Amino acid sequence: MEDFLYVGKDVPRTAEINKVTGRAVYIDELKRPGMLYGKILYSRYAHARIKSINTEKAKKLPGVKAVITGYDIPDVRVGFMEDQTVLKRDVVRQYRDEVAAVAATSREIAEEALDLIEVEYEELPAIFDPVEAMKPGAPLIHELDGHGRPVKSNVLPLRWTLNVGDVEKARRESAYVVKDSLTTPWINQCCLGTSGCVAEFDSVNNLTFYSQTNVIFGAKQRISRYFAKIGLKDKKIRVINPIVAGSFGTKLDTDIYEFICIQLALKTRRPVKIQFTREEEFRTLPPRQTTRFEIEQGCDKNGMLTFRKAEAILDNGAYTSWGATTPSVMMMPISSLYRVPNVYFNAVCVYTNNIYSQAMRGYGNPQASFAVEVSMDHLAEEAGIDAAEFRMKNRNRPGEVTPMGLKITTCPLDRCITTVKEKIGWDQKRGKKNGRGVGMASLIHVAGGARVYLSDGTGIRIKVDENGHVDVLSGSTDQGQGSQTVLAQIIAETIGFRPEDINIIFGDTALGLWDAGTHASRHTFIAGNAAIRAGEKVKRQILELAVEYVPKLLKSDFRKQKKKDPDFHEPELDFTLIDNPEKLDIKDRMIFAKKAPENPNFRIDVARVLNRALNVGNGESKTVMAEVFWDPPTQMLNSEMKGNWSCTYAFGTTGAEVEVDTETGEVKILKLVAAHDVGRAMNPTLVKGQIYGAAYIGVGFALTEKLQVVEGRVMNPNLRDYKVLTALDDIPVEAVIVEDPDPMGPYGAKGIGEPGLVPTAPAIANAIYDAIGIRFTDLPITPEKVLAAIRAKKQENQQRDA
Amino acid sequence: MKREIAFTLNNEEIAVEVEPNWTLLYLLREVLEMTGAKEGCGVGECGACTVIVDGNAISSCLYPVMEVEGKNVTTIEGLSKEDGTLHPLQQSFIENNGVQCGYCTSGMIMSAKALLDKNPDPTENDIRVSIAGNICRCTGYVQIVESIRKAAEKMKNT
């Protein structure tokens, strides 16, 4: 084990001290001089034609500075498929459709003005079930596509098909085959801070946009494209991140309210803020979409997987955001979790009049892994093999290339499975069917970036000033995971400073170099790699200056000492010990000679050298700064959906022990063990924080959370009826860090942002099956469903007995 | 019609004109510009706006401002010492990763402080009950509970 000073240590999150003193500035705290408050009027129908909009009364309300509708702004399309306009003026296709917007001197006035806007609608037939919407003859949600061409079907023209080997042949030759249907619900990401932004134009229409996006350059690009369409081409755009109060997928795309805010700022010539209420957050923020999976897989008589076939239907809602690309990630567990030679996957995203969807932590992987892992348990049972042993037999191994073309480098999945087995008491507890049960599930996820854009790169700039202070300008963002601390540790380790010497500045397109975004669990891996490379350059520059200036500093020190003390004798120093950068090193900001590390004369604070190098007085002053743009050597998925799109992949296994109350239907989680392959943990406490937090969201996904969308309308738009877990849902989670340093990872690290969520729900579902013999395939597994299933099973048994 | 109310805010006597329909959170955030208490929901369901009034942790988004007349209000801004030394709870949240995005943190710490002021030796269950009304989406509460437990231990031993 290498000896590190800061990497792998529990460095505290001192960089975020303002979060515990109440001084942190989130979007909700951000105020600009003369700022107005924007509010949006949403549709009253799931599908309707707008007959008229009257804003006259609203405009007359004192304090109202602008009221805009689709008739007041350019009628141009936005979004990934360009399938919507910013304000809708002809047809509304979902309850959250934005019909008008107001900017006023206070939130209260803006709200009052909304009530004064009169809109007449003519209701149209709506369709809420994606299966119905796919049928020939179903009413079309969109009659034209983004390019104005007629649309024939509600199925999005995105092809998500992977076909490797011969699934049909493999099925015929399999000894055991199982088939399951599984469904997952709408999930609201529930960031504790609601969505919001501030748009501010200068006098010549350059925009500063304060946005919570976790893809600042993506946001800038989208705004730039929008500007080109509305006559603001070449205006400067600066996107700035305040401190972000949670993301979980919600900040990937530029939302419509952000474009509206820009339009209101443009119209009023004043800064405008839009900040959602919690109810708005529930009603209008694109959630994780519902999915229906049909999955079939088989194995031979020895229990080796032969094929896996999965088909998914995703409810896209009325418009398209990044949620429609989650099948690319679903393919990963379908094709590459455990070794399976023949794979077929196909997913369709379908327009309906429901709320349009986005991505959420895991990006489709939680839904797909739920299907794969529940089915794995089913198949193990069918084949008469212990479910843990079945997984061990089929586990992934280092060096393999999966059917999707993923090149597995390190893979301690065996250790994850055995750790869970041991810690959950698998051999003692499995198979009792006495109301208590244990289950497990594993995962594979990208952990070394994800080439979803043509560049998966990141830029970093490190500068060290004459005081020895380090400012790091990174093009990425942090949404609460602790990137400041981890990046500071990595840089401190690389350049020989202390983490507290390092100030990380994220989230400003004007300061940072391009970055693909803090998504796909990529930040530590990608930014860490860039940071090491830039740090090495910075260190080299410092040591080169040290070679030049340390002898001069020492000589001037000696002269001064001699002045003070005539008896002072200059020590005889071997300057060849420091005559080359290779001979020097830095530790805790002190430069020293490698061959004489204890020699006090050669131990010099970096700040002294840099101060001396800057203040030379002869036109040759120097400063220390390095920048690196690093794009990992990975591939985009090709037209067959194959490609090694990440430098490395993370594995992990979660085990659950549950107790099912057969009287109330309640599922109590007695224990969760989450063993995760993290390469090398940069900061074990922070890594565990990611695992715990993700596991809890996973438990919510399994047991409690469901956005109730009834005929397109969100029926539980509050934290009382949408069941996020609280501290009273005391779930004993044990996070186990499994280390196997990754050769390409920064100091061996892999990404860990998303994995903790992924295997949680299937592990719980499998444990419930082990407890009561009922396989739940529809999330969340609520007490009502459990009770109904227990009753149905009883009846079935009675009928059979009779 | 504005009315003047007087109360103690973070050990300082203050008098301020308020509209009777304001909430305490509105006064704190919009008028006094003390934005440590957060508005996560505005309807008393998330706990991000928790402050302490006369020793009890309350949701300031529901608390009528007229009710604070003559009372003693402590917010997150009043926890650290004048020289900037953090309260043990604040320190513990930083050290034990009780903070991620930080939006629930002010409320969590105030709920925990109200608990520790009354019960310096809480069980894990006491801690969980004290923050039952504070929702956190990032941490799974594990390291928050640990932060509070460790702060309690530290406060007991000093």
Image (cartoon, coloured by chain):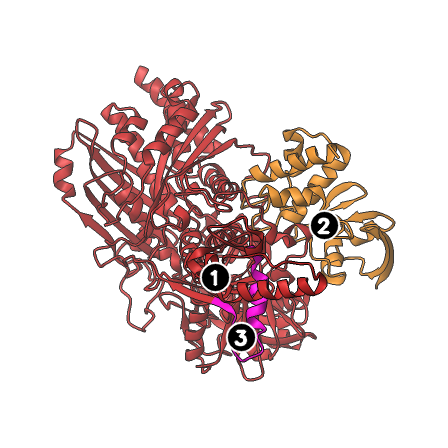
Chain colours: A red, B orange
Q: Is residue B83 left or right of A29 when viewed as pictured?
A: right
Amino acid under label 1? Answer: Leu
Q: Residues within 10 Å of mark 3 (few under 14, many from 20)?
A: few
Q: Is residue A379 left or right of A721 when viewed as pictured?
A: left
Q: Residue A531 at what x, y percent from top left?
A: 44, 58
Dividing the picture into quadrants, the one containing residue A638 is bottom left
Q: What number is the disc on residue A656? A: none
Image: A247 above or below A508 = above
Residue located at (56% from left, 34% from top): A729
Q: Is residue A519 left or right of A309 when viewed as pictured?
A: right
SS class of the residue under badge 1? helix
Q: Residue A374 at what x, y percent from top left?
A: 33, 34
Q: What number is the disc on residue B76? A: 2
Q: Is residue A145 left or right of A231 when viewed as pictured?
A: left
Task: State the residue in front, A786 or B49.
Answer: B49
Q: What stretch is highlighted in magenta?
A: A603-625
Amino acid under label 3? Answer: Ser
Residue located at (31% from left, 59% from top): A154
Image: A497 above or below A53 = above
Image: A367 above or below A728 = below
Does residue A750 appear anywhere in the picture? no
